[in-house]
Amino acid sequence: MRPQADGLAAAQPLALVQLSADEPLVAEGQRPNPADFEVAELQELQKRFGVHGPQTPLAQLFTAGLDHWAPLRSHTLQRLEALMPAVRQEAKRFQVNPMLLTAVLYDELQHAKPGEDSELAMRSGLFQTHGPAQLGVEELMHQHLLPRHPSQKQLEAARQQLLDPERNVALLAGKMARISRALGVPSQQQLEASTSPRDAHLIATLAYLHNGKLDYPNRILTYMQDPALHGLLFGRQEAQSAPLI
């Protein structure tokens, strides 16, 4: 289980780090890191959404080790490939950047605990989040798909939804759209990290509020540039146009 932000804030614009929308993207180290947050911004995010700070150094080291284990990466890519039709469909429906969804799903699948997505594990109550995107039943409440005080039968049905991979992807896309609205992003605006530093920072903020850890946005932004993930999502379209991230 990975901690996630509460997300119960009212929809109002967030005072983000000031990044010009037309600032050119140059080599890393020559421009602000989109995943950097000012103290006042972090305080506002904590007040409105709830945040947790970075992972411990040992946890970060363990995560980095998993990312470089080739057999696990290959297995994760295979699992992720099966979700690509749902990612494309739900990203279009919710006007969410599909590479953001792909990167989040890759990270969550890569670091999933063995057996945690089984129905047995779900019924055991050991895990509070389920499915490819590691979402909890609270997210269905946030999206008004589950009452604030559900019955046991409604809770079980909600957890079954979370275990359904395609439904889980749809709920992840809905979560990103919901948080985007809370941050003041226009509903029809799809954020593009490769063309706008401000969009890149907003994407980092979405990643932060999904997972609740300060080291998570950098990881997601890195995955969004992963050629293998681009190949899964845009492989059949590369001959027509170069995808935006």
Image (tube, grey):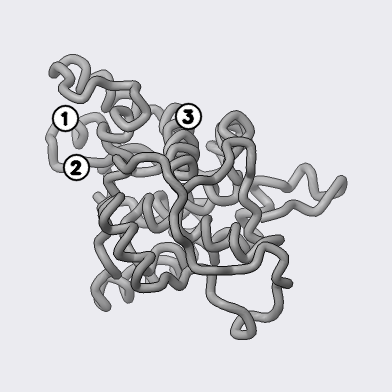
**Is the residue marked by circle 2 packed among few (<14), some (14-19), or many (20+) residues within 10 Å?**
some
Label whose residue precedes the other's in the sequence (3 or 1): 1
Give the answer, above or below, for where 177 lies relative to 159. Answer: below
Query: How far across and down, in percent of the image, does residue 134 sit?
Result: 34, 43
Residue type at mark 1 is Arg
Three-letter code, disc 2: Phe
Kindly check if marks 3 and 1 are in contact, taking CB atoms under 8 A apart as contact: no
The amino acid sitting under disc 3 is Glu
Q: Is residue 210 above or below residue 138?
A: below
Asked whether the beta carbons under mark 2 and mark 1 sit within 8 Å of each other, the answer is no
On the image, which quarter does residue 132 sit in? top left
Question: At 63% across and 42% down in the image, what residue appears?
Answer: 189
Q: Which residue is mark 2?
A: 127
- Neighbour class for label 1 at 10 Å: few (<14), some, many (≥20)? few
| Residue picked out by circle 1 | 123
Q: Quadrant of the C terminus?
A: bottom right
Q: Quick check: can you spot residue 242?
A: yes
Location of residue 20 by image quarter:
bottom right
Residue tagged by mark 3?
166
Q: Is residue 135 left or right of residue 107?
A: left
